[in-house]
Amino acid sequence: MSLRTRCPKEAGTLARRLAVCGDTITKHIEHSGMNYGELRKKVHEHFTEVLKKAKARRDELGPYTELEKERIADTIRLHEAVNEDYWDMLGRDYARSELDKLCNGTGVGQPKTQEEAFLILGEIKKAQLALTKALLEHDKTFEKYDFLAPEVTTEARDPAPPPKHDGPTLSQAVEAYFTEQAKIANWTPGTVQKRRAGLAIAVEWFGANCEMNQIGKQQAAELKNAILTLPANRSKAAATQGLTLREAIDVKDIPRISNATVNSYLSTYKNFWAWAEAHGCATEALFQGLTIGKKGGQAKERKAYTQDALSKAYKALTEPESKFYRKESHRWATLIAMFSGARLNEVCQLELSDIRQEKGIWLFDITEDGENKKRLKSDAAHRSVPIHSKLIELGLMEFISNRGLVDQNRLFPDYTYSLKHGYGDKLSKWFNRTFTTSLGIKSDAHVFHGLRHTFATRLARADVATERIQFIIGHERQGVTHRVYLKDGYSLRQSKFDVEQFSIT
């Protein structure tokens, strides 16, 4: 049984009310006359005697059974909870009993405030944890005989001090990770936001001050299990708004995030821990092989448009006096995507300077040159795509010329930038919500990205080589030949021929 299933929601709420900052506790200790060092000494002496008796009793009974070991493992996990949460889970009466036992047996003064009580209870919890681990180590002495070692006695030894950790905390490692990636990675703001959101969940689960070397494979698996039950739209949904992560995943009968989103989080964790292990922030690269299958998720499979849907879309965008669009930007941005296979944001962030003529061939330069908000998905996305003759026939060059009369460098200045979606948000919403609905072709496949899928599919059916399709649509090409010797891609003449293989019919 996990800790979260043992702990009612009220415990987390009570814990937050009782939690106070360290400075407040320190000042209260000073005013009350309590000496922290003396408290630690008395707690240590008290539990040394407890350990001595426990070892002697264990020597009489013999080694732990497997069931007893499982219960001890549960006890250790319980003791690793946040101090206030731990005692709230066990109840006020048990906490009072442990306080009295320590105070009466050691001469430590009874706490006068809740702050003092939780301070003493925190030392008790730490000592109990160390004692439990010491008993497990003692149990190992029953597994074999070592005639070269000093004689095993039941004389109690002081529990070993807790190990010192010099490594960074999780939150420190996360910040170091993003600081480095900002310098060397070509992440879009949306990618940064998505990966920060994923790692924020890990920080919330483990705690910001959790040391990296305290997170192992078991802890990674526990986080994965929590992610599998994470509610969709946790911060917005009425049932989970304002709840902590552990509280939110306990809420019943609400939608959960899709398998695709789960895998996105797990991929973020895998990449982060691989970086952390390589940079000495973690002892091992965790989350390898923890992804899950796609079945049961909410992600939709992307498919090429049906002939009927593509024909309807093309007709609605090109027919004189069409009532299916009101903005020229919607019309031309969609047609460019349809006849080039370019991504949504690649089209929407085009600048007038990105459209030029070379060797008699008009082309789109898909680059990050220009204003600093332009972003591409990868290095392979940098490319020049010849403009399909059908776009020129429909009047694209006249549209571009008219745009040039306005004091604006962007081809579609009415598409504003957002950190999460780049420049494509307005076009995507219009296309997926209004345009396809009004045409009667709305489906999981007939989304804006489906135009790109359709373009690539039709080139493949026209016998255009896969590597040449990848070059035109900005996918990474595989193999030494294409990644080294043909790094600069194909000629404009070759790409022009390939692009022209796309047909609406």
Image (cartoon, helix red, strand yellow):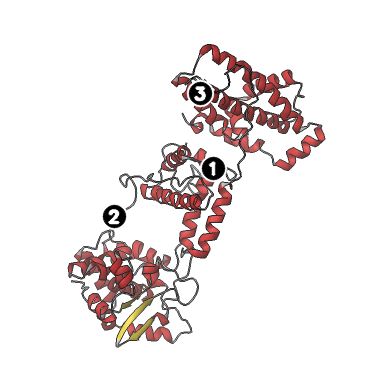
Disc 2 and disc 3: Cα gap in Å? 53 Å
Q: Which residue is mark 3?
A: 140
Mark 1: amino acid: Asn
Q: The residue tagged with tag 2: helix, strand or loop?
A: loop
Number of the front mark, 1 or 2: 1
Decide: is 350 above or below 222: below
Identified at 64% across, 28% down, the residue is 127
Farthest residue to the top: give it: 60
Disc 3: CA contacts within 10 A as few (<14), some (14-19) or many (>=20): few
Number of the front mark, 3 or 1: 3
Q: Is residue 266 left or right of residue 50?
A: left
Q: The residue tagged with tag 3: helix, strand or loop?
A: helix
Decide: is 148 above or below 403: above
In the rendered image, residue 301, in percent from the top left (x then y), is placed at: 29, 54
Q: Which residue is mark 1?
A: 213
Q: Which residue is mark 2?
A: 301
Can residue 7 be seen here? The reply is no
